Image (tube, coloured by chain):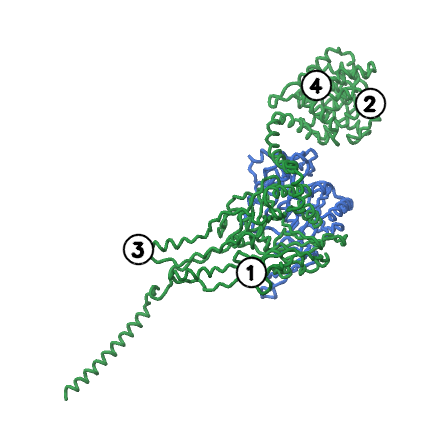
């Protein structure tokens, strides 16, 4: 959610239950403005909160002019001091995907993972158990990256693409209509499109290249991994992800208010197919 | 669009022409400005020639910039020149008007407008070049205009360059007549050559050109029924009304919006009615909530309410939970508060509590925990036990037959009866509703079988109470039963209170009496003095469970199903394969501290926090359950409250594995008489034969010896 409209956004996203306490809110408001100035971001989003056993991580993201460019992620334990996180690399992804369980809340905590690695010693090849240490910070980067790629969403029409390349915020976006807001196809993944090129020409003909340049939620696998609901007597549409429980996207139809926030343990719900 | 601008320019050029002749700005402005757009009179009334000049300079520069950047003839692009054209044309001097008329075709009107300024000042090479290009282009309507516009833009940047770089920075203060003339000469460039004597063209030619241009603009499109004239005027109106920043950047969007608005108006009445209807319905229902107070405003009732207040102070609890970062938002909580009040007003309720919110796929559940007044429970119809004993009937039928078919030894395990209301898992009655304002629905009491199976499945709630639960093992009931079972589990697992808040009632039997399953009632301790918040946070032993633990049987109080079986044993002679003695399941007794809770794979079952690190003296202690994510408890030392908000599932670090179906039941005992034996193999047969032969031989030898003996005897 945009840091500019933090208070309203938190109020709108409160349907999922977990939000922020007043002191965190107050410190966020001030610290995010400072972050925006210091790092010279165009927009700062408050991404959410990852619950750990000892402490929680508060995550913010900074965007540059081009909305689809890779975002910079910052984390904080107390909402006042922010540290930049490195971007996710493939190695990080491979390493951290094996870690399971809750986050500790201590960024220097190391998870131990025992791996069987083939070690070459001279001419013999034998497997050894190697204990790989994975820092919690790495895991944090990995989880945030996964969540962003999988479930960060944006309504159709909020961004538009110019022929020159960069994606801009659409200032004439007045919100989705009520009927549109209930359809999954009106929401896009907030990332570079992956499945767009797989669409048939017939489907592509109906798309508007300046607005429909991202993947829509319709074809997400597994089907039914999104729950769309109208809350607050039909004035707010809330999408909750079932794959990453804790991600809430809200949008007030016919207004410009929209955003998403993740408040959860940072674990994927692998039991989803059983639960539907 | 280009065409539209040109006739407008024409008119304005004509106006300017007159103005220049007479230097009477206003008179020239008014007649012609009134036609195209509503804003024109405003512009005209600004009146000063310098103003016009500046406008024109402004107008030309953005126009030029816009055109060069946008390039080809795209409809919306030309909208940018449109608002500027009246201003531009206003600046063109009158002598150019005749020059306009020289070019007969309306599409060429842009050229005509450009001619007008040229008559004034010869602008050297760039203009000539552009005019050449213009004249060489074919008189194809849109293309030519596009080209001319493009070309006309080319010199303009030159002109605008020295003065202004960006569109919005058009310097209104540069009112030099030369520049003004240059602009005009730019725009009317290609008429420069033939129109040196343009001031002598008759006005009638001008008028016809204008009318032709206007007629062209008013031509309705065969596809959409719009005409360019109206569209341009609408767009310009909108822009001037809204005055967006960087209008030129979003001009295409604005044009699109105007077009869409034109269409959507036709459907407006239909769409709006449908879309807003559900919103209004729900708002009406919620309004009813707020009106409750006024329905029966008798003083006596008020007193009653104040005296026996079954309603909890939801707002106060919500405030504390908000300190912890948990909550539903103030107005939503207030609506829930009102809905609870409605519940207490319509049902005879002793005590009521806002239990929490369970999220579902289509709708959510708001759950209220309720305790009815003594003697006022509604009697529930006995629900049929799902695990009925059917096999008894079958076995009786079989006995009649002569050949006794093998009877099944399978005894359906006796269904464990549910606990009485007000005891154990059914201590409280739960009401749910989907949204505050909707009617409250009472959930049925929970059966141990449901709890047992609910422990084995993991399903999302859909939000509809009558939805079936399709799972393995099959859940005995629908979503309302599953919901009730989960609520029971969550309550048993996560409802905690500070140590000492509750104590066992003294009327209850003392330690000598062993009530089965331990004491199961408690009451508030009037002498509770509160615990320091710091203490509450530091150690978990200061918190206790005040809801009975649910045994694996599914009940809180152990039910010994063997006792009844003993009676049956006397009647039936069948062999029983069940153990004669089932161990009594024992769970932790009531009011055990939560430090005794078992860990989940090295994760502590509870996380304690102070609500605020910045102001610890007023902070409250917050407990989060790691076993049931979404269960929270707070205490400020004296007060406490529990709350749940979440999906309604337990946390497990491992993935869910569905239970395996039980092994196939043994149909009959396999003994040696039924067991099939293998046919002997070749070696075995040979060995057997050899053995047999050996025996025969031995037997024969014995016979021979016996015969010998007999023979010997015979001799004697």
The chain letter corresponding to green is B
Query: On residue B51, which mark appears?
Result: 2
Determine if residue B394 is in view: yes
CA gap between label 4 and label 1 equals 100 Å
Q: Tell me the residue that label 1 is attached to.
A: B517
Q: Quadrant of the C terminus of chain B?
A: bottom left
- Tell me which label, 2 or 1, sits earlier in the chain: 2
Can marks 3 and 1 be said to lie on one chain? yes
Q: Which element type, helix, strand or loop, lies under badge 3?
A: loop
Say if mark 2 contacts mark 3, CB within 8 Å. no
Mark 3 — residue?
A: B401
Q: Disc 3 vs disc 1: which is toward the camera?
A: 1
Question: Which secondary structure, mark 4?
Answer: helix
| Separation of marks 2 and 3 at Cα, in angstroms | 115 Å
Residue placed under numbered mark 4 in the picture: B108
Q: Earlier in the sequence, mark 2 or mark 4?
A: 2
Give the Cα separation between the discs numbered 3 and 1.
Answer: 47 Å
| In this view, A245 is above or below A216 | below
- Specify whether B450 is left or right of A8: left
Give the mark, 4 or 1, whose residue is nearer the N terminus.
4
Is disc 4 in contact with disc 1, using a CB cutoff of under 8 Å? no
Q: Nearer the viewer, mark 2 or mark 4?
A: 2
């Amino acid at each position: 959610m945009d840091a500019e409209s933090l208070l309203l956004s938190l109020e709108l996203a409160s349907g999922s239950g977990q939000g922020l306490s007043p002191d965190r809110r107050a410190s966020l408001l001030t610290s995010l403005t400072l972050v925006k100035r210091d790092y010279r971001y165009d927009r700062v989003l408050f991404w959410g909160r990852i619950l750990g056993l000892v402490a929680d991580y508060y995550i913010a993201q900074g965007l540059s002019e081009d909305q689809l460019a890779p975002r910079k992620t910052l984390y904080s334990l107390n909402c006042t001091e922010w540290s930049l996180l490195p971007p996710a690399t493939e190695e990080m992804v491979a390493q951290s995907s094996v870690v399971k369980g809750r986050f500790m809340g201590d960024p220097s905590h190391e998870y131990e993972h025992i791996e069987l690695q083939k070690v070459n010693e001279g001419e013999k090849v034998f497997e050894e158990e190697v204990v790989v240490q994975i820092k919690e910070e790495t895991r944090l980067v990995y989880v945030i990256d996964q969540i962003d790629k999988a479930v960060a969403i944006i309504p159709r029409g909020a961004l538009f693409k110019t022929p020159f390349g960069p994606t801009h915020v659409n200032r004439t976006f007045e919100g989705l209509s009520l009927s549109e807001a209930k359809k999954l196809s009106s929401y896009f993944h907030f990332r570079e499109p992956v499945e767009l090129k797989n669409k048939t020409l017939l489907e592509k003909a109906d798309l508007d290249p300046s607005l429909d340049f991202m993947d829509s939620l319709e074809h997400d696998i597994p089907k039914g991994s999104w729950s769309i609901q109208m809350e607050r007597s039909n004035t707010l549409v809330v999408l909750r992800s079932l794959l990453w429980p804790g991600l809430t996207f809200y949008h007030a139809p016919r207004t410009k208010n929209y955003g998403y926030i993740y408040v959860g343990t940072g674990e994927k719900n692998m039991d989803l197919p059983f639960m539907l | 669009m280009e065409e539209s601008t040109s006739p407008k320019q024409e008119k304005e050029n004509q106006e300017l022409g007159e103005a220049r002749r007479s230097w009477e700005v206003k008179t020239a402005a008014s007649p012609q400005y009134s036609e195209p757009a509503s804003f024109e009179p405003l512009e005209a009334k600004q009146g000063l020639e310098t103003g016009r000049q500046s406008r024109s300079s402004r107008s030309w520069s953005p126009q030029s910039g816009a055109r060069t950047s946008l390039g080809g003839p795209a409809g919306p692009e030309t909208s940018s020149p449109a608002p500027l054209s009246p201003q531009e044309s206003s600046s063109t001097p009158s002598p150019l008007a005749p020059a306009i008329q020289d070019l007969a075709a309306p599409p060429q009107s842009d050229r005509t407008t450009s001619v007008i300024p040229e008559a004034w000042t010869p602008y050297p090479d760039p203009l000539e070049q552009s005019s050449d290009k213009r004249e060489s282009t074919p008189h194809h309507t849109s293309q030519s205009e596009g080209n001319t516009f493009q070309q006309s833009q080319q010199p303009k940047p030159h002109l605008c360059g020295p003065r202004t770089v960006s569109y919005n920075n058009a310097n209104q203060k540069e009112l030099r007549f030369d520049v003004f003339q240059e602009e005009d000469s730019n725009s009317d460039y290609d008429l420069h050559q033939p129109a040196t004597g343009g001031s002598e063209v008759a006005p009638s030619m001008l008028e016809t050109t204008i009318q032709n241009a206007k007629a062209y603009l008013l031509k309705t499109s065969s596809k959409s029924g719009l005409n360019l004239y109206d569209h341009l005027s609408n767009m310009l109106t909108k822009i001037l009304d809204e005055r967006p920043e960087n209008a030129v950047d979003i001009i295409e969007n604005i044009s699109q919006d105007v077009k869409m608005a034109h269409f959507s108006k036709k459907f407006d009445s239909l769409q709006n009615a449908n879309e807003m209807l559900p919103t209004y319905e729900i708002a009406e229902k919620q309004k009813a909530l707020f009106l409750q107070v006024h329905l029966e405003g008798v003083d006596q009732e008020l007193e009653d309410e104040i005296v026996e207040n079954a309603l909890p102070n939801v707002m106060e609890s919500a405030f504390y939970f908000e300190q912890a970062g948990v909550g539903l938002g103030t107005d939503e909580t207030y609506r829930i508060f009102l809905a609870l009040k409605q519940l207490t007003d319509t049902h005879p309720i002793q005590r009521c509590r806002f239990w929490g919110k369970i999220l579902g796929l289509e709708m959510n559940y708001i759950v209220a925990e309720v305790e009815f007044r003594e003697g006022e429970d509604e009697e529930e119809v006995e629900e049929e036990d799902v695990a009925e004993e059917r096999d008894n009937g079958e076995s009786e039928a079989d006995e009649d037959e002569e050949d006794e078919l093998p009877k099944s030894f399978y005894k359906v395990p006796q269904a464990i009866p549910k606990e009485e209301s007000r005891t154990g898992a059914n201590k409280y009655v739960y009401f749910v509703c989907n949204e505050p304002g909707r009617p409250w629905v009472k959930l049925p009491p929970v059966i141990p079988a449901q709890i047992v199976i609910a422990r084995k499945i993991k399903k999302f709630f859909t939000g509809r109470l009558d939805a079936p639960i399709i799972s393995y093992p099959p859940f005995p009931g629908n979503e309302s039963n599953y919901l009730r079972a989960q609520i029971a589990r969550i309550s048993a697992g996560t409802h905690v209170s500070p140590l000492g808040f509750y104590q066992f009632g003294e009327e209850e039997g003392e330690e000598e009496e062993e009530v089965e399953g331990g004491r199961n009632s408690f009451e508030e301790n009037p002498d509770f003095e509160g615990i320091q918040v710091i203490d509450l946070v530091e150690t978990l032993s200061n918190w206790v469970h005040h809801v009975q633990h649910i045994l694996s049987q599914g009940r809180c109080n152990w039910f010994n199903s063997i006792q009844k079986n003993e009676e049956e044993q006397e009647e039936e002679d069948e062999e029983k394969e069940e153990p004669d003695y089932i161990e009594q399941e024992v769970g932790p007794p009531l009011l055990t501290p939560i430090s005794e809770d078992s860990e989940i794979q090295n994760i502590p079952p509870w996380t304690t926090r102070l609500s605020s690190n910045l102001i610890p003296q007023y902070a409250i202690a917050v407990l989060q359950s790691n076993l049931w994510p979404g269960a929270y408890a707070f205490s400020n030392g004296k007060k406490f409250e529990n709350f749940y908000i979440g999906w309604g599932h337990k946390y497990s670090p491992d993935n869910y594995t569905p239970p395996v179906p039980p092994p196939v039941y043994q149909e009959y005992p396999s003994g040696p008489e039924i067991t099939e034996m293998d046919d002997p193999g070749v070696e075995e047969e040979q060995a057997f034969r050899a053995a047999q032969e050996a025996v025969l031989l031995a037997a024969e030898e014995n016979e021979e010896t016996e015969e010998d003996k007999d023979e010997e005897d015979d001799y004697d």
